[in-house]
Amino acid sequence: MTLPADLPVVDHHCHLSPAGEGVEAARRFYREGGSHLFLTTHNWNHSPLRSVEDYRTQFESIEKLAQRIEGETPVRTSLVVAPYPVDLVAASDALGLSKAVEIQMQTLDLAGTWVREHRAVALGEVGWPHFPVPEDQGLAARQIFRHALEVAHDVGCPAVVHCEDLMAEGYRALSDQARAAGLSPERVVKHYALTYVPGPERSGITPSFLARKEGVAAALDDDGPWFLETDFLDDPRRPGAVLDLATVPRRAAAIARDHPDRVDRLRIPFVESVRKLYGFTPQRRAEGSE
Ligand SMILES: [Zn+2]
């Protein structure tokens, strides 16, 4: 069995870079059966961003890349924008912590404006470094994250969270943080979810599972909401990391081939969860329309 023709195939979290494979990667994704990318901005220059203007330039570059993808391939894109939480570390070293915090806070406001203007669908990645950092930076990251949750609430969009892998307890804590900032946990996505935690233990948070074989197998029994992602970095220094952009369509095709009775379960990450979190229904562009 092949995938149903009307089934969108969605990678919920990836990065493409003007300095990397860019549009070609999206073309490859399409050839394997992919249709929708949630394209998340990131720092592809590997040097600290020193101002809100630097972030604005970054957002605009990724928006241009998304427009090229939409113009040159049948793939549809949704932008997710924010100052990457780990940027705080390098920026603190370069500019001092308080300046680094100020830039992240103001960039979150900018990201909120982009959502209001419908140039982006969510705030992400927001959160905190997934590795130990000096205490003052750790506290600052939490403060910035709180602001991110408030902005997401104010502009009415999901927050896509970067942090260490979570178990039930971590999901509960994240859910509490969201609620304390006024954001419903139903609007929070934990990106890069590695460990499968059953729905009732996720405290209302939606996991975006890394599309490894075992991860997908566990998720298929889950009634959702949940997503699949590659977290593809499009970084020439780390080719194919985290997972290659072709992975989500390949996993979907493998399910159609090996477990045809389960293909309908893919509507959970590719249709229902998108509708629930983002309020739109992904639809494949007609064949041949570029
Ligand atoms: Zn990422």
Image: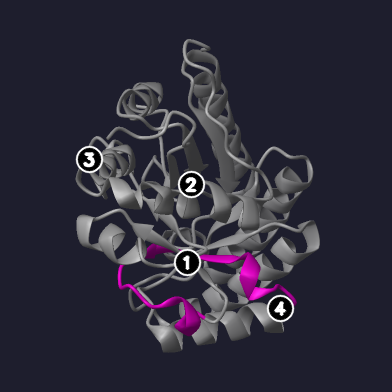
For the residues marked 1 and 4, what is the alpha-carbon distance in whole angstroms? 27 Å
Residue 161 in view (yes/no): yes
Residue at position x 58%, y 48% from top? 81
Give the residue type at disc 1: Asp
User: Residue 231, image x and y in percent?
Assistant: 36, 50
Q: Which residue position is annotated with label 4?
A: 181
Q: Which residue position is annotated with label 1?
A: 223
Helix, strand or loop at mark 2: helix
Which callout, 1 or 2, points at the residue further toward the start of the chain?
1
Horizontal relation, residue 86 to residue 241: left or right: right
Query: Which circle, 3 or 2, is nearer the viewer?
Result: 3
Q: Which residue position is annotated with label 2?
A: 270
Image vertical order of residue 30 relative to residue 39, above or below: above
Number of numbered labels in the structure image: 4
Which callout, 4 or 2, points at the residue further toward the start of the chain?
4
Give the residue type at disc 3: Arg
In magenta, the rendered stretch is 182-202
Which callout, 3 or 4, points at the residue further toward the start of the chain?
4
User: Residue 112, image x and y in percent?
Assistant: 72, 53
Give the residue type at disc 4: Ala
Give the residue type at disc 2: Phe
Mark 3 beta carbon near ligand 1 (under 8 Å): no
